[in-house]
Image (tube, grey):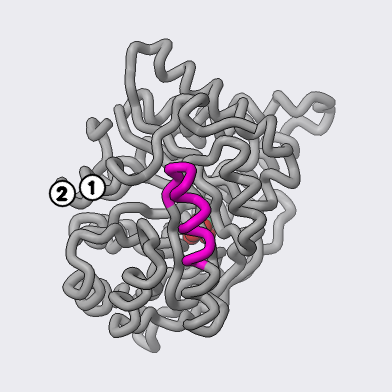
Amino acid sequence: MYHYTELGEVNTKDMFRKAYEEGYAVPALNFISIEQFNAIIDAVIEKRSPVILLASPNLHRQLGYEILARIVQSGIDRIHGCGLDIPVSLHLDHGMTFQHCVDAVEFGFSSVMIDGSALPFEENVALTKQTVEYAHRHQVTVEAELGVLSGAEESGDGEGNGESLYTDPHQVEEFVKRTGCDSLAISIGTCHGLVKIKPDPDGNLPELRYDILENVMRRVPGFPIVLHGASAIDPRFVDMINAYGGRIESVAGIPEEQITKAARMGVCKVNIATDGWISALANTRKILAENPQAIDSRIFTLKNRELLKEIYLHKIDVLGSAEKA
Ligand code: 13P
């Protein structure tokens, strides 16, 4: 057990204050492999961007908390070794129970999400408040969620149904006041997974509900707002997956200019998982198909790191966080 400061992390408080004041969003990037983690660190070093590393409860089941913390520490050491002081937070993505959050705090996470969004309002308030009271005793920041995003939050490899229950701006002020949470994920039309939005009959993609975002921000001025489900789903990678044996039928991501607009309006943190996963998987399928004699996974892991780095460099530009460390 150890505190996140021992690993060189910071919590999200100052990251969000600066992001809000300067009109950009901090990239919050899920990783599920060492090469993906290394690619994130490569990109933030090159761009001098703050970063939030997202680990879901699935990831710590895969790796164990102890190893996860040490991986993050190794990335921070590498940043310091370059003479840089980039703010890094390890954040629990979609903690579903109070115990998930306790485990994370005890193993070096500087920030946790308690996701009570599927619960009735009062139960979400109670669970969030309990988590905040515990986490704040350890100087760990807490993200909560109000409004429901559809899609595969846990694994990210399922399909969303394109419907979301938008956040009710009238509930936000009361929720923030009563829970004491440090940031809030809201639902304005983004969605986890591969199918986020449906084109209208003329083929036009709907816009995010900026009116809801504005309304929320008016009610809690300066309070950090978070967007989940923000992947763009590049059809090139979907086509590549299908060309090499996959079967993914329909996709529709969030156009990146809509995410840039939300970041400029005051969204402080944007979560991206699926864009990383599909690009690495597409690349892996292609390389394996082209090298049927391969017996060593490094034939694709090294190439995946390069590809993922390019993707994260681009995402940092989309969110405006370059040179903000
Ligand atoms: P995407 O599925 O759009 O990448 O969203 C990931 C996310 O919000 C994780 O919490």
Q: In this view, does 58 lie to the left or right of 199?
A: right
Q: Position of residue 21 (x, y in %)?
A: 15, 49
Quarter of the figure with residue 271: bottom left
**Which element type, helix, strand or loop, lies under badge 1?**
helix
Cα distance in 3D space between marks 1 and 2? 6 Å
Amino acid type of the residue that numbered disc 1 sits on in the rendered structure: Arg
Q: In this view, does 268 lie above or below 152?
A: above
Pick whichever, 201 or 98, lies toward us. Answer: 98
Q: How many labels does the image show?
A: 2
Q: Is mark 2 on a helix, strand or loop?
A: helix
Left or right, 210 with reference to 29? left
In the rendered structure, does residue 204 fall within the stretch colored magenta? Answer: no
Question: Going 50% across and 30% down the picture, which residue do you hit?
Answer: 39
Residue occupied by mark 1: 17
Give above or below for 28 relative to 216.
above
Q: Is residue 179 visible?
A: yes
Left or right of residue 5: residue 100: right
Q: Which quarter of the image is occupied by the C terminus?
A: top left
The quadrant of the rendering that contains the N terminus is: top right
Residue at coordinates 21% horizontally, 77% vertically from top-left? 215
Give the amino acid type for the residue marked by disc 2 in the picture.
Answer: Glu
- Residue 29 lies, in percent from the top left, at 47, 45
Residue nearest the viewer, comparing 90 with 6:
6
In the foreground, 323 or 302 = 323
Asked whether residue 136 is drawn in magenta, I would say yes
- Left or right relative to 23: residue 182: right
User: Predominant secondary structure in magenta?
Assistant: helix
Specify the segment rendered in magenta: 128-141
Residue displayed at 64% across by 36% down: 33
Indicate the position of residue 70 as horizontal and vertical percent values. 62, 26
Q: Which mark is residue 21?
A: 2
